[in-house]
Image (cartoon, rainbow, N blue to C red):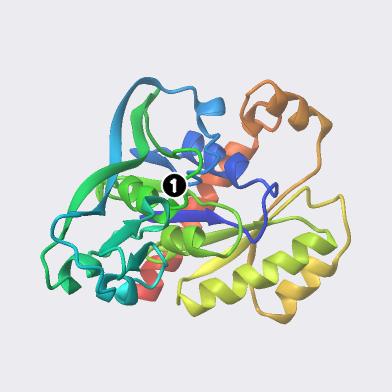
């Protein structure tokens, strides 16, 4: 079972919920941090014996002796990663803009383009007690977050419960993370910003045709507009986590929210069972 924890904005509590779910599960579990631009699950799970695996993309290299500057490679590239100069009979590659599609090499009639590997990030894998910990980390300055996210998701064991901590927002990284999840939990907060970005996230997962429900964090700190929206849209709210100074204090020390709310663990196990039943009913 693959459960993605997502939201329309940052700071709603995705990592808080993801870590707590992984700690509460009474079955073999993987925690996958796909927020590769700012992974922080390790601050709470404190994994040991983390092994690193580099994530590479294949980028074009132009052989100046063969290139005639015809520009066919530049016309094929949809990302502006190659500029051709017919007068100088050359082409210039901007590796950071390349999406590694390989189209330029196929288009080159002079066979002047080959490809070489370029590292864009790493996948780190270790253990946190009984939890298998996996996270991606995008290199600073890189834009290819989906490539690293894909490498993280390649580590999913179909025999285990996978808790996937998604990037914030509704752009490509979030879509790459959630597009094949068995279930998506959208974490929000009862504020105008929380409601606005929740509507964007709901529209996204509906486009992806993923089953989903909502968790409201800091549920007693705002107003009722998020609850009203979910009621109007027939969206189930499966869990409400109240505002707590004690939870914030534990969080600031790198402790799980379970340290502040020990009784939450039983609620989270019940939540996992509820999600499993929903998936089974949908598949029947």
Point out the image quarter for the C terminus: bottom left
Q: Is 94 drawn above or below residue 118 in the view shown?
A: below
Q: How many marks?
A: 1
Q: Is 255 drawn above or below residue 185 in the view shown?
A: above
Residue 197 x %, y %: 70, 65
Q: Is 181 drawn above or below residue 164 in the view shown?
A: below
Residue 274 x %, y %: 50, 59
Residue 190 x %, y %: 80, 58
Residue sitting nearer the eye, 154 or 95: 95
Residue sitting nearer the eye, 235 or 35: 35
Q: Secondary structure at mark 1?
A: strand
Specify the quadrant of the image occupied by residue 54. top left
Residue sitting nearer the eye, 142 or 50: 142
Residue 191 visible, this orientation: yes
Horizontally, is 199 left or right of 125 in the view? right
Horizontally, is 18 left or right of 29 in the view? right
Q: Which residue is mark 1?
A: 163
Horizontally, is 64 left or right of 110 in the view? right
Residue shown at 30% from the left, 45% from the top: 160
Residue 284 visible, this orientation: no
Task: Assess disc 1: are there few (<14), some (14-19) or many (≥20) residues with their C-alpha within 10 Å of its C-alpha.
Answer: many
Residue shown at 67% from the left, 56% from the top: 9
């Amino acid at each position: 079972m693959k459960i993605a924890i997502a939201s329309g904005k940052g700071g709603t509590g995705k990592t808080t919920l993801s870590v707590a779910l992984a700690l509460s599960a009474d079955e073999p579990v993987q925690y996958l941090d796909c927020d590769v631009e700012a992974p922080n699950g390790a601050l709470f799970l404190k994994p040991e014996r983390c092994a690193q695996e580099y994530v590479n993309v294949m980028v074009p290299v132009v052989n100046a002796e063969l290139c005639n500057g015809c520009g066919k490679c530049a016309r094929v590239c949809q990302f502006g990663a190659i500029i051709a100069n017919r007068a100088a009979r050359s082409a210039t590659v901007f590796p950071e803009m390349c999406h590694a599609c390989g189209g330029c090499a196929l288009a080159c009639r002079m066979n002047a383009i080959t490809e070489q590997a370029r590292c864009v990030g790493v996948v780190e894998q270790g253990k946190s007690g009984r939890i298998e910990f996996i996270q991606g980390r995008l290199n600073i300055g890189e834009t290819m977050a989906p490539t690293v996210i894909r490498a993280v998701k390649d580590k999913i064991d179909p025999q285990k419960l996978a808790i996937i901590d998604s990037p914030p927002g509704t752009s490509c990284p979030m879509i790459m993370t959630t597009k094949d999840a068995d279930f998506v939990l959208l974490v929000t907060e009862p504020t105008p910003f929380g409601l606005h970005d929740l509507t964007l996230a709901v529209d996204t997962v509906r486009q992806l045709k993923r089953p989903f429900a909502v968790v409201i964090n800091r549920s007693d700190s705002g107003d009722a507009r998020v609850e009203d929206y979910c009621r109007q849209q027939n969206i189930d709210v499966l869990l409400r986590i109240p505002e707590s100074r004690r939870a914030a204090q534990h969080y600031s020390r790198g402790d799980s929210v379970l340290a502040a709310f020990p009784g939450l663990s039983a609620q989270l196990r019940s939540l996992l069972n509820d999600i499993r039943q929903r998936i089974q009913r949908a598949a029947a």
